[in-house]
Image: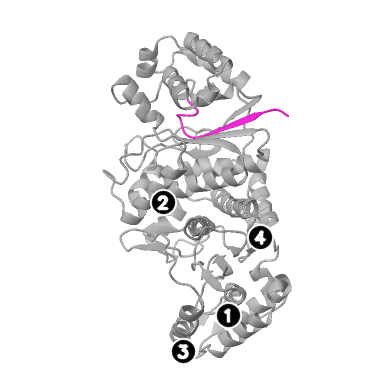
């Protein structure tokens, strides 16, 4: 039977260059990268359930990772344009911020910090419980640093408990964000065309994997890392994205997900 | 060990008169009613996760029922009440039965953000989650339809892919005929909320294992508590009935220690 790896999360999982999921993926026969840039935890939980329905997760062949993303998000399907709107954090934004109108409408009129934390707690708890009760090998880890919810927003005690509980449910406590800061690693890429991207670099992810996911610090992972570095185009953000898809994503990941799109 | 029963759903589970959950509840040492009038399936699912966290659901002592509610709903988290508290905003069917009396926030969501496809998708996710968790944890349970959702995919058009999701929801439901349809057929015309008697008839038909001596006794008690079914449905319970029913609930339904 072929080994399968399913990765869920935001742009820290699926981006325009290799992420931690892409490094782990080198160790499996089939790699399904179901991350979506800017998505919320509720969205990723729904994707997890869909993938379970389509691929029938089982303990013999499957490994799952869930990168917990920012709490201050809510993904909305845009039926008119047939896309999911996943613009990242919307609850923190100032009034002049530019985001899709529907997500701003939700954030400004309906959302609040308590509910945002609660939604993320439900999502993480659901994935954690299903993985545990189905005996699925899995790792839940924080991608984004959400610790400011403990300090900056004066949340009621029962919501603070939920923030702590989410962390308790994570198999790795240190987020990718914190890891980079605490280790004084440089993050982001400055392209020669003037564009920049502040996401963690491939090296950041590789170092995080070596510290927290040692079981995947293999020769295959190193080869994958070296390959991803070799195809990196520092000249242009657009060429990098194109190269990444052409030379990596279409070759090494499974693309036909059959998940619901608006 | 004390047997425990947890009921989830909308007003067809927790209402101003007895529901099917109250009939089932008398057969357990501890009965928790987590139903919230007007709530959506996502909220029922979230509450199930809360209950699992707090009460540590287990196969030895626990039984769970989930009454699937209307798909065209979206419960909004933690709105401020008139008293300054925070509470769920659960306004019922806001997408298909939009009403000017619905709270502003739920109307805004229904009008500006929601659509039939997403509403079905959300309900599928919720029902699939509850079914998967309960099955995987080997918790004895029953998932039944409270509200009639048969018009989804017909009057309320959805894409072919979402139609498949609608069919999948059916696979997770143990009792296909909804309480809604059952009561409407029994009465001969559309009813708003089934009467206590209709809840009992539904239990007799579909959950005969709970039609015990205790249930029959409680049915008699409820019959004495609510004597005029027609008036009850038309005008709601009177002061005396409210008092007796609240008193019954205080004595027989355990306080829910949910997080929110």
- Marks 2, 1: nearer the viewer: 2
User: Label 3: which residue?
Assistant: A193
Q: Earlier in the sequence, mark 3 or mark 4?
A: 4
Name which residue lies at 65% across and 39% down. B57
Identify the residue at image location x=65%, y=53%: A132
* Residue at the image point whose x is 62% and y is 32% from the top: B256
The answer to whether marks 4 and 2 sit on the same chain is: no
Task: Residue under label 1, please give it.
Answer: A188
Cβ–Cβ under 8 Å for marks 1 and 4: no
Q: Quadrant of the N terminus of chain A?
A: bottom right
Q: Which mark is residue A39?
A: none
Answer yes or no: are tags 3 and 4 on the same subunit: yes
Q: Residue furthest front?
A: A1
Q: Position of residue A174 (x, y in %)?
A: 70, 66
Q: Disc 3 to disc 1, how far (Cα)? A: 15 Å
Q: Main secondary structure of the magenta part?
A: loop
Is any part of residue B24 visible from this angle? yes
Q: CA distance from mark 1 to mark 4?
A: 21 Å
Kindly check if marks 3 and 2 are in contact, taking CB atoms under 8 A apart as contact.
no
Query: Which range of residues does the magenta coloring cover?
Result: B1-15
Disc 4 secondary structure class? loop
- Say if mark 3 contacts mark 1, CB within 8 Å: no
Write down the residue under mark 2. Answer: B121
From the top left corner, tell me how far across and down residue B159 is, in percent: 31, 55
Q: Chain of mark 4?
A: A
| Residue picked out by circle 4 | A147
Labelled pair 4, 2 in contact (Cβ < 8 Å): no
């Amino acid at each position: 039977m072929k080994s399968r790896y399913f990765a869920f999360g935001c742009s820290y999982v699926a981006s325009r260059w290799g992420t931690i999921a892409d490094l782990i993926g080198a160790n499996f026969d089939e790699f399904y990268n179901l991350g979506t840039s800017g998505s919320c935890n509720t969205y990723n939980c729904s994707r997890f359930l869909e993938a379970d329905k389509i691929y029938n997760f089982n303990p013999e062949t499957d490994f799952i990772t869930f990168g917990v993303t920012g709490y201050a998000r809510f993904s909305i399907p845009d039926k008119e344009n047939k896309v999911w709107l996943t613009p990242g954090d919307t609850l923190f934004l100032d009034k002049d911020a530019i985001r899709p109108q529907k997500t701003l409408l939700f954030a400004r009129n309906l959302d609040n910090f308590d509910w945002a934390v609660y939604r993320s707690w439900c999502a993480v708890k659901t994935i954690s419980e299903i993985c545990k009760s189905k005996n699925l090998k899995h790792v839940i880890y924080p991608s984004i640093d959400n610790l400011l919810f403990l300090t900056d927003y004066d949340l009621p005690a029962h919501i603070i408990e939920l923030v702590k509980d989410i962390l308790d449910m994570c198999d790795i406590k240190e987020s990718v964000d914190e890891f980079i800061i605490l280790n004084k690693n440089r993050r982001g890429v400055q392209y020669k065309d003037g564009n920049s991207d502040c996401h963690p670099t491939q090296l950041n992810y590789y170092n995080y994997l070596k510290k927290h996911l040692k079981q995947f610090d293999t020769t295959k992972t190193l080869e994958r890392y070296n390959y991803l570095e070799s195809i990196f185009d520092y000249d242009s953000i657009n060429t990098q994205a194109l190269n990444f898809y052409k030379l990596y994503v279409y070759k090494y990941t499974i693309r036909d997900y059959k998940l619901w799109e608006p | 060990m004390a047997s425990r029963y947890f009921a989830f759903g909308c007003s067809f589970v927790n209402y101003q008169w007895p529901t099917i959950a109250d009939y089932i509840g008398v057969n357990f040492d501890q009965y928790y009613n987590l139903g919230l009038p007007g709530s959506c399936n996502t909220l029922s699912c979230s509450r199930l996760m809360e209950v699992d966290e707090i009460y540590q659901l287990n196969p030895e002592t626990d039984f769970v029922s989930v009454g699937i509610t209307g798909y065209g709903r979206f419960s909004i988290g933690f709105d401020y009440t008139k008293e300054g508290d925070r509470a769920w905003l659960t306004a019922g069917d806001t997408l298909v039965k939009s009403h000017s009396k619905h709270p502003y926030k739920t109307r805004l969501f229904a009008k500006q953000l929601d659509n039939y496809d997403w509403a079905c998708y959300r309900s599928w996710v919720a029902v699939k989650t509850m079914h998967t968790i309960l099955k995987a944890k080997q918790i004895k349970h029953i998932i039944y339809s409270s509200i009639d959702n048969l018009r989804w995919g017909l009057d309320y058009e959805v894409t072919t892919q979402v139609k498949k999701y609608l069919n999948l929801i059916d696979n997770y439901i143990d009792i296909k005929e909804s309480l809604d349809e059952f009561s409407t057929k029994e009465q001969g015309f559309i009813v708003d909320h089934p009467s206590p008697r209709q809840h009992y008839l539904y239990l007799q038909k579909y959950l005969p294992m709970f039609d015990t001596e205790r249930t029959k006794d409680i049915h008699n008690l409820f019959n004495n508590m609510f004597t005029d079914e027609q008036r009850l449905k038309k005008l709601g319970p009177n002061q005396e009935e409210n008092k007796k029913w609240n008193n019954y609930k205080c004595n027989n339904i355990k306080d829910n220690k949910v997080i929110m």
